[in-house]
Amino acid sequence: MKLDWAVYGLELRSPLRISRSVMARRDAVRVVVERDGLRGHGEVVTSQFYGLDVERITGLLRDLAPVAADCADPAELFERLPELPPGVRAAVDAALHDLIALRQGVPVHALVDVPQWTDVPTACTIGIGDPATAAARAAELAGRGFTVLKVKVGAEDDVATVNAIRAAAPDARLILDPNGGWTAEQAVRFVDGLTGVDALEQPIPPGRWDDLAWLRERCPVPLIADEDAATVADVRALAGVVDGVNVKLAKCGGIGPAREIIAVARDHGLDVMLGCLVASSLGIAPAVHLTGHARWVDLDGHLLLADDPWTGIGGEDGTLRLSGVPGLGVVPAGAAASGPATSGPATSGPATSGPATGSPATGSPAPGSAAAGGGLVRER
């Protein structure tokens, strides 16, 4: 088997502000696993929060390439995967699932206990901003068909902003996400004064589980752990502390680990949110195939981009849609008009793919990328 990769930049439509950072762009690395003329694809994005830049990602892939070359099939590479940062492992995991599904002629969701996939609404994120700007964004999204809005909070005018969003989109369900920017007492005061909130995600800094339990007893809406819920062990321990967990493939290591976390969450009475980082449709697609397992779906990372280099999962009108073709079901945006979505042998990836941006031989970063001197961005 052959492992290859390419580096490309992702620019956001507008800077996304959360309680701990602001992001305007990030780099992505497309991972390709090839066997018998079929190519499976995955994507990992740079993240200061998770300690991933282009140099580290491509260095790990360079080390993995000889292991892949020595494997006869995807199953063997799964078994021989070394310990990797979750984001990198998730990209390789996605590429292998894509390749396996292509070889079997089925969509990825058929491999993960979702034989009949249905269209699903996704939340779309409104970053921290002034109330008027947030309200205008909410009205725009509601007009496009979004019924769920994730509102980033953690600023002084949170109450005014959420009230403005509620007035602009009165029928939308709201998920509030302070990214750990509140205290437990602040969360209680804030949520008590609002109506129409569907859930509250990671209101306090991670690691304060006693405060989470205290908050849950007083919070009138479901409480979801994100940064606190990275592993199966975390999820087991969070039973009775929160109402749900946010499962991100880049946080847990891919489709396989996500399925295990989802199963443990259900066994312990916890609901599941499927979340994401800002990424292209290629990076979001693996989680889309798991939406049949989730109560809340927040897979909008590709919708925040100025120019998504991949297409195939929808979402622009608030609803995610898969084509039903084998594999992940995404193609480079420029190829979408020439045929049905597939990740098969004809797919070469965005225009920046190939040796010009990174290869197993050199792993050199693209000009302007974080590893080549461009600015790092923080994950959402």
Image (cartoon, grey):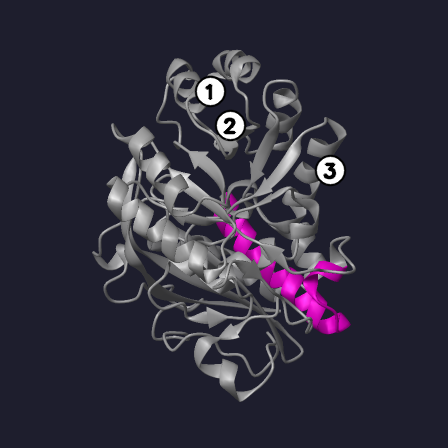
Query: Residue 112, image x and y in percent?
Result: 74, 54
* Other residues around mark 2 within 10 Å, as few (<14) / some (14–19) / many (≥20): many
Pointers 1 and 2 in contact (C-beta within 8 Å): yes
Please indicate whether residue 364 sits to the left or right of residue 236 in the image.
Answer: left
Task: Report the predominant secondary structure element of the magenta stretch.
Answer: helix
The residue type indicated by label 1 comes to: Gly
Quarter of the image with the N terminus is bottom right
| Residue 119 image point, x, y percent | 65, 60
Quadrant in the rendering for residue 130? top left
Decide which of tag 1 and tag 3 comes sooner along the chain. Answer: 1
Q: CA distance from mark 2 to mark 3?
A: 17 Å
Left or right position of 335 against 233: left
Marking on residue 263 = 3
Percent x, y of residue 111 = 75, 58
Q: Which residue is mark 2?
A: 228
> What's the residue at 36%, 61% (across, down)?
305
